[in-house]
Image (cartoon, grey):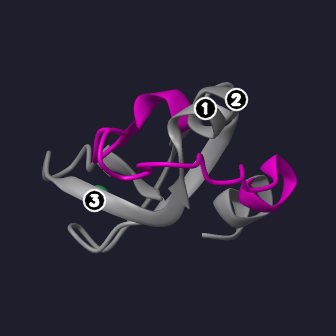
């Protein structure tokens, strides 16, 4: 799995949201918004999922059989909880 990351708009440094997904699920989540508690600046950022990115490429992560997609609903709940 692959953590969704963002760039902190205050420090411009990379922050992992702690929400892990894969590319196909990430693309489905892109229209939604997420809240991120930011360890870089200590604040909270609300932004569209599409403003984030996945830190790792899919190659080498899910070698062999593709992993099952996490439920979109549970990911969305996590995004809103942060
Ligand atoms: Zn920040």
Q: Position of residue 37 (x, y in %)?
A: 45, 69
Task: Evaluate if marks 1 and 2 touch, with contact meaning CB atoms under 8 Å apart.
Answer: yes
Kindly state the secondary structure of the residue where label 2 is placed: helix
Which mark is drawn over residue 28? 2
Looking at the image, is 21 positioned above or below residue 26?
below
Residue that badge 3 annotates = 15
Q: Could you tell me what secondary structure mostly forms the magenta stretch? A: loop
Q: Position of residue 27 (x, y in %)?
A: 60, 27
Report the front residue among 38 and 79.
79
Q: CA distance from mark 1 to mark 3?
A: 21 Å
Kindly state the secondary structure of the residue where label 1 is placed: helix
Q: Position of residue 53 (x, y in %)?
A: 37, 37
Q: Nearer the viewer, mark 1 or mark 3?
A: 1
Q: CA distance from mark 3 to mark 2?
A: 21 Å
Q: Which residues are magenta?
A: 48-75
Q: Residue at x 62, y 53 (%)?
A: 67
Q: Residue at x 68, y 25 (%)?
A: 31
Q: Residues within 10 Å of mark 3 (few under 14, many from 20)?
A: some
Q: Nearer the viewer, mark 3 or mark 2?
A: 2
Q: Nearer the viewer, mark 1 or mark 2?
A: 1
The earlier-in-sequence mark between 3 and 2 is 3
Q: Is residue 52 magenta?
A: yes
Report the front residue among 13 and 44.
13
Q: Position of residue 77 (x, y in %)?
A: 79, 62
Which mark is drawn over residue 24? 1
């Amino acid at each position: 799995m692959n953590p969704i990351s963002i760039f902190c708009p205050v420090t411009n440094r990379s922050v992992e949201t702690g929400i892990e997904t894969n590319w196909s699920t990430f693309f489905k989540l892109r229209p939604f918004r997420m809240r991120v508690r930011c360890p870089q600046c200590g604040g909270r950022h609300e932004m569209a999922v599409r403003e984030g990115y996945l830190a790792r490429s899919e190659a080498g992560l899910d070698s062999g059989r593709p992993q099952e997609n996490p439920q979109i609903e549970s990911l969305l709940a996590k995004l809103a909880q942060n």
